[in-house]
Structure formats: C-alpha cells, structure tokens
Amino acid sequence: MIRNLLLYTLSLITVCQLSAGLEETEIFDWSRVVTQSEQAKYISSVLDAWNIKFPMRAKKPLRVVYFYAKDRKPVANYLERWDGIISDIQDFFKTEMNRLGYQATTFTIEKETGKLNLHKIRGSDNDKDYNYKSGGKIREEVFQGLRSKGINPEEETLLIVCGLSKTEGKQVTIYSPYYGMGANHIRGLCFTADMKWLSIDGLKPDPQNIILQVKEHRGYEPFTLNRFNTVYIGGTIHELGHGLSLPHNLATKREATRGTALMGAGNYTYRKEWRNEGKGSFLTHSSALRLLVHPLFNGDRNQTKESPNLTFDELTILHDQAKILIKGKIESAIPTIAMIAYHDRENKGQRGYMVNNNYDATSWTSVISPDNEFKIRIMDLREGNHQIRLTSVHPNGATTTKRMHYSRQDGVFDFSKARQEIENILAK
C-alpha cells in the first residue's frame, strides 16, 4: 500500500531541474486533484499509508440502546424492525462511501445470535414522566445502565432508540427526544423514536395506500406510510450523522443533481427513489471525509485521543465574482489528510437575531500536498453576510476549525473582518 502511495504521489508531482543542474525541487500538480474522484483517490492513498504505520487497535462499534419507561414494554417487534433499520443505514453509508471513491466502508455494529445487539435499558420513571425535552434525564439513566455492563459511555457513539410513543390503530403519538447532544470522534450521542409502523418495508411502495395520523409537536397530521418511514428512518440516520460528528450542510449546485444532502434536509427524502417519488438522499464529499477517519469507520487506534495541534504558517483569501480561493500552509502533530471549507450564509433566527444555522452551508474540499499546502475554491456565491469555517480532517478522526467572516452586497465584497481574523490565526 505504501508503494502504491509513492507511485500515485509521483504521478501528481512535476520535477523541475534547477539551473545548477544538481538540485531538484518538487512542485505539486494541483490540476490533478480538482475533481472529487481525483481527490478521493489521493486522500485514500494518504490514509492507507497512515493506517499501515498506526495499525488498528480494535473495531469500535456503534452502541445502539433501546430505552423504555418503567411501566411500559418495548414496542412490538422492536428487535426485528431495528435490526433491519440499522442494517439499511449501514448499507446507505457503504454505498455512498463507495460511490465517492472510498471503498465500501461503513460503521461496525454489535451482533448477538445473528441480529443487532440492542442494549435494553428500562427507565426509572413511568411513561408519563418522559417527553421530547427529557434527553438529559434519559442520558443519565442510559449512562448508568451502560456502566453497569462495563461500558464507558463517555467514550462511545450512542444511538438511543426511545420506545416513547403510542399507537392506536393508524393513530400515532410521538413524545420522544429526537436530536443529538454533542459529538466528536471519541464520543457522540443522539436520540430517535420507535413506533409500531416503523420498518424498512414501510419505505417501499405501499399497494394498500395506508394513511396514518401522526402527532409529534403539533396536532395530528396525515402521513402516508411511505412518508412516515422516510421522515422517521431518515430522521434516525440524520441524527446518527450528528452523533458521528457531522454538521448540517447544503448540497452545492453540482451535488444537488443527485438529490438532497443527508445532513441538509435529507431526513425528508431518505429512500424516496425506492418508490420512484424523486431523488433521495445522498452523502456530500465533506461528510464522507469526516466519516472516513471516524473510529467507527476507520477503527480505534492508540492515536485516537491525540491532539492534531494544527497551526497555520500561511493563509490567504482571493476572490473574483465567480469564486473565492483560499490558500494556506499548515503544520500539525497528526497529519492532515484534507481541508473542508463550510460556506455558511447568515440567516434570521427564531428570535429575530442573525445567525449561521449551518443548514445552508455549502462545503468545498481540498487535498493536502506533500508540502502541507491546500487550495479550496468556493463557488455558488450569494449576497449577504457569510461565515467560512475552515476545518482540517486528521486520520485519527480529529478535526480543527477556524472561522472567518465576510460580506457581499450588490456584488461588492468586504473581507476586512476576514483579514483581521487571518492575522489572529497566523499569530497563534
């Protein structure tokens, strides 16, 4: 694998002989790593070489927990249904990572007698005592239950499936937490809900045209069985994405030809293509890069907890009316395999304040040259105030982020704030 890396690296380098005739300098050919597929090939080679140098300590599995109230039983057929759901989510990641050039890699799960190992944890309170805002309370009860099994929840990625719903015929009431509670490459936690009508079969064409009445945050609303499963299984994989440390992002104009980014509004389009109802959800390259190095995908190693200690030696921003070009040179204790720029427009929040909510953040990527340089082109430029989050990706799963701000009004750019932020970044 190292030999393959050397051969591939040489194919990306033009060697120029200096006038002295004896010295040589290597010039990285950036024109060979412009497309996503070219970047994937190069990044894979760099990661493979690092993985050989630092072998995997162990496969690290996703821990799936089934939580239910003291006075309730788990929802009917929960194990069979969630074995199918988690297997499908595995397959989605595997297929998307393979499409993007990163082989058929996906996260590991625990198995017991051939099925998903669901860690059942019974709550200390009755069903009426839990609701959407009970995430902190459930977290503590789950952590206590896992510790009794010898599992340290502070170093795990946890998907907590809550049996906090009621189904009466075709009427479904949901009062479960349904969100993430912070994550990095070492730990992550997210909640989803279980309901009787939830299953992989429900994502497929429904000849009976079943209509459910579903209540979550508002009154009852009609859902086809297909839409119900798309929204709530799609919601599960979207929240799991947060548990795996993925931020929200929006597909670029080119990416959007595939459908909807999973970490954008992809929870509303999951597997729609199975029913010929339009394009479904897909994984952006930036999300794939972060999953590629996550210990659940790439294995746990002795270096997993080490800090990259990233510093910038050079950092510049240039622009014209069509694009922004960010160039830089970095140093880090843990090598950097890629750089991502999240380009996020400021929007009005719920209380009227202007915020960067990530949902409309397009993402742009660059490889890291042998001289630790990167070049990122940001396209799809829009009017307004913007934040650029420059995020380095490291093979142990770690990331680091620096933020810069600029505005564009009537086609006129103002990078004065970004220039000051760059000075601060370089000074550290």
Image (cartoon, rainbow, N blue to C red):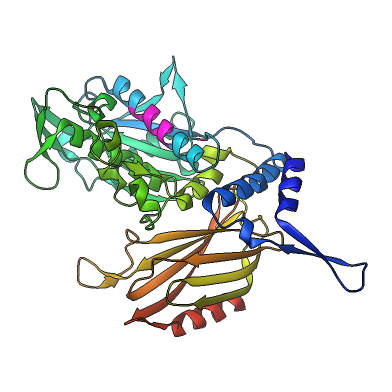
Q: How far across and down, in percent of the image, does residue 226 sit? A: 20, 32
Q: How many marks?
A: 0
Q: How far across and down, in percent of the image, does residue 121 sit? A: 33, 29
Residue nearest the observer in this picture, 163 or 3: 3
- Residue at horizontal 23%, vertical 33%? 229
Compared with 163, 47 (above or below) is: below
- Taken as a whole, is the magenta stretch helix, strand or loop? helix
Compared with 248, 163 (above or below) is: above
- Residue at horizontal 35%, vertical 61%? 358
- Residue at horizontal 32%, vertical 26%? 82
In the image, taking residue 261 as reference, residue 396 lies left or right, namely right
The N terminus is located in which quarter?
top right
Compared with 236, 166 (above or below) is: above
Residues in magenta? 85-92
Extreme top residue here?
113
In the image, taking residue 40 as reference, residue 160 lies left or right, namely left
Q: How far across and down, in percent of the image, does residue 317 sit? A: 53, 76
Q: Is residue 363 magenta?
A: no
Residue nearest the observer in this picture, 310 or 306: 310
The C terminus is located in which quarter?
bottom right
In the image, taking residue 28 as reference, residue 300 lies left or right, namely left
Is residue 165 in sight in this rendering? yes
Compared with 410, 175 (above or below) is: above
- Residue at horizontal 58%, vertical 66%? 375
**Based on the displayed image, in which of its 4 quarters is residue 210 positioned?**
top left
In the image, taking residue 349 as reference, residue 17 lies left or right, namely right
Is residue 126 in sight in this rendering? no
